[in-house]
Amino acid sequence: MKLKKQDIVLLAVMLAGVLLLGAFLMLTRKSGAEVIVKVAGKQVTTFSMNKNTKYTIHGVNGGTNELIIEDGQVWLEEASCPDKLCVHQGKMQYSGQSIICLPNKVSVTIQDENDTNGVDVVAQ
């Protein structure tokens, strides 16, 4: 199959669009200000991203996760769940990012100082 001139132009325009969108997203993301910890959908505690913290989260059915906040980044260092996907998610630092542990029903979400109600859009 031979590419026509129009195909190459279309691919170039699509690639440029993807690169512009990626650059826009990278330049507009915000560092988080606080970490919100929830277990089974209920907020357990919040922490500042500016203070180094080590906290054990007690999930459902006796499960535990070890939360670390250090140098403006947050991650789960240890977990009692069998697959440890939450641990492998790595370090997070930007508003809107989350770490989820489904077996323990734990969620750790980063929020910036302007997002106080957790609502993205209000429809009327």
Image (cartoon, rainbow, N blue to C red):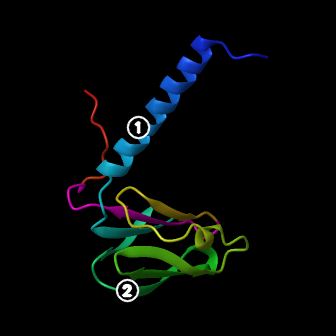
- Around disc 1, counting alpha carbons within 10 Å, would you say few (fewer than 14), some (14 to 19), or many (20 or more)? few
Asked whether 9 or 90 is in front, the reply is: 9
- Around disc 2, counting alpha carbons within 10 Å, would you say few (fewer than 14), some (14 to 19), or many (20 or more)? some
Q: Quadrant of residue 19?
A: top left
Amino acid carrying label 1: it is Leu
| Residue, disc 2 | 53
Image point (44%, 85%), residue name: 55
Asked whether 34 or 92 is in front, the reply is: 92
| Residue, disc 1 | 21
Percent from the top left, x then y, of residue 95?
34, 58
Question: Marks 2 and 1: in contact by CB < 8 Å?
Answer: no
Asked whether 7 or 29 is in front, the reply is: 7
Mark 1 / mark 2, whichever is N-terminal? 1
Of helix, strand and loop, which one carries label 2?
A: strand
Was residue 109 drawn as part of the magenta stretch in this picture?
yes
Image point (55%, 75%), residue name: 59
